[in-house]
Amino acid sequence: MSQHYQNLLNQLGQKIEIYQELADLLMKEWDCIAEYSLEELQEILVRKEHLLFQSKIVEENRNKIIGLLAEELEIPQEKLTLSKLTAARDHHLNQKLEGHRDRLLELIALISDLSVKNKNLIERSSLSLKKSLAFIHCVAEESLASYHQNGRRGGNKMEGRMLNTEA
């Protein structure tokens, strides 16, 4: 059983590293969105996908270890949490497991917060870009129109000029 505890501790350590790197990438993503840096943003997205894939593998390994521990403790796997594991049996690694659990919870909260902030920034940036494009389109349309919205005649500079001198 001691080996299972150590393996679980190693898997949680890997998960902490992945989550910390993901949080760092989300902070960089904010800067890229704010600066409209598409190339860097695409690189970050590729790195995030890779981290999520790694996280999935670590999670599968963690679930296998939890399954083995659940069998030994005679607790259904779906009901075995880190808190219940540390409470079920006195083990010298319990304190480290609880420390990893607390750090993971902190990182999950940070990642969730950063994701929401980045989503909101993307929405605001997109809206700002749409409004800017609409304004430019409106100004361009007005400058080319023969009549303004108020019915006055526009100053179309092309009026009465010959475009082709060979006609």
Image (cartoon, grey):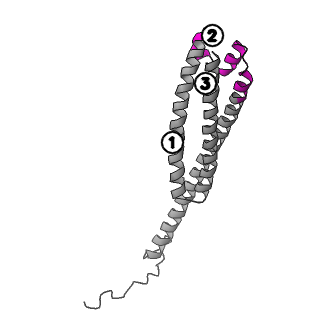
Question: Which is in the foreground here, disc 2 or disc 3?
Answer: 3
Q: Residue furthest front?
A: 3
Q: Which mark is residue 50?
A: 1
Depth order, front residue of 35/58? 58
Q: Which mark is residue 7?
A: 3
Quadrant of res 33: bottom right
**Mark pair 2, 1: CA separation:** 35 Å
Q: Earlier in the sequence, mark 3 or mark 1?
A: 3
SS class of the residue under badge 3?
helix
Identify the residue at image location x=70%, y=35%. 106
Magenta residues span 71-99
In the rendered image, residue 138 lying in the magenta stretch gets the answer no
Q: Which mark is residue 165?
A: none
- Badge 1 density bin: few <14, some 14–19, many ≥20, Cα 10 Å: few
Identify the amino acid type marked 3: Asn
Identify the residue at image location x=62%, y=29%. 10
Identify the amino acid type marked 2: Leu
Query: Circle 2 is placed at which residue position?
Result: 73
Question: Relative to 146, does residue 36 appear above or below in the rendering?
Answer: above
User: In x, y percent, where is residue 29?
Assistant: 59, 51
